[in-house]
Image (spheres, rainbow, N blue to C red):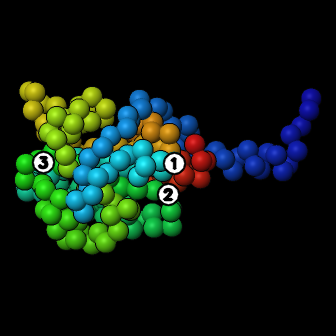
């Protein structure tokens, strides 16, 4: 029986995560929206070769959105050493959530770098398509509702996980999965 050299075994084990291989739930197609600075946001350009986390919120929400955005801020703070990780918050209320409103909302959360955390708006139809058809979130009776789940996307645009923001145990697991995806260069 052949044995694996110690160096090869160490390298193999270093690439393994205690959480195992992450599933794939589909691919996010390219999209074009508008960010909080009023500039076009082309996912192909802005998110190429990045691991990113998506949420769907709206700025006038009196329900879970403030907590979800605070958790996104916590995730941002916990991932500052990961240069190719991004946060993307999509509005579900593009009529009210103009770039100016999103910018003000982001500043209230301490967002100073829109390339690190983007707040996106655009045509209602495009946002519905992304929420419902791409991320499989938030469709209730044919209208756009936001989900309390965060969605993790890898460098190739594959959806690799859903995390319930109401679950206090979800954030540590999410951080581990972000690290796994960024370190493995998947």
Does residue 88 appear in this view? yes
Q: Residues within 10 Å of mark 1 (few under 14, many from 20)?
A: some
Give the secondary structure at mark 1. Answer: loop
Give the residue number, with chain letter if any, for mark 3.
94
**Vertical arrangement, residue 132 with respect to residue 6, above or below:** above
User: Is 98 or 85 nearer to us in this picture?
Assistant: 98
Image quadrant where residue 68 sits: bottom left
Marks 1 and 3, the one that precedes in the sequence: 1
Residue 171 as seen in the image, left or right of residue 181: left
Q: How far, Cα to Cα, is label 1 from label 3?
A: 27 Å
Question: Which residue is found at the position 31% from the left and 32% from the top?
Answer: 134
Q: Which residue is mark 1?
A: 49
The foreground one among 84 and 32 is: 32
Query: Where residue 106 sits: x, y (%)?
Result: 23, 65
Residue sitting nearer the eye, 128 or 10: 128
Relative vertical location of residue 124 with respect to residue 74 in this rendering, above or below: above
Q: Is residue 74 left or right of residue 109?
A: right
Element under disc 3: loop
Q: Is residue 64 visible?
A: no
Mark 3 neighbour density, 10 Å: few (under 14) some (14–19) many (20 or more)? some
So how many labels did they put on this image? 3
**In terms of depth relative to the viewer, which is nearer, 30 or 181?**
30
**Image location (x, y in percent) of residue 36:** 23, 60
| Left or right: 145 as drawn, with respect to 42 | left
Is the residue under label 2 in contact with that under label 1 (CB below 8 Å)?
yes
Report crowding for label 2: few under 14, some 14 to 19, many 20 or more residues within 10 A (C-alpha): some
Q: Which mark is residue 84?
A: 2
At x 29%, y 69%, the residue is 111
């Amino acid at each position: 029986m052949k044995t694996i050299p110690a160096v090869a075994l160490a390298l193999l084990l270093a690439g393994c995560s205690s959480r195992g291989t992450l599933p794939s739930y589909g691919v996010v197609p390219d999209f074009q929206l508008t960010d909080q600075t009023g500039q076009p946001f082309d996912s192909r350009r802005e998110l190429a070769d990045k691991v990113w986390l998506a949420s769907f919120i709206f700025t006038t929400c009196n329900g879970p959105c403030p907590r979800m955005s605070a958790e996104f801020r916590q995730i941002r703070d916990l991932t500052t050493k990961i240069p190719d990780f991004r946060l993307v918050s999509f509005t579900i209320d593009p009529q009210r959530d103009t770039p100016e409103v999103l910018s003000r909302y982001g500043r209230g959360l301490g967002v100073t770098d829109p390339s690190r955390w983007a707040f996106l708006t655009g045509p209602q139809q495009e946002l519905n398509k992304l929420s419902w058809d791409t991320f499989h979130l938030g469709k209730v009776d044919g209208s756009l509702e936001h989900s309390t789940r965060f969605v993790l996307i890898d460098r190739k645009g594959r959806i690799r996980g859903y995390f319930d923001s109401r679950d206090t145990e979800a954030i540590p697991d999410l951080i581990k999965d972000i690290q796994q995806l960024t370190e493995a260069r998947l």
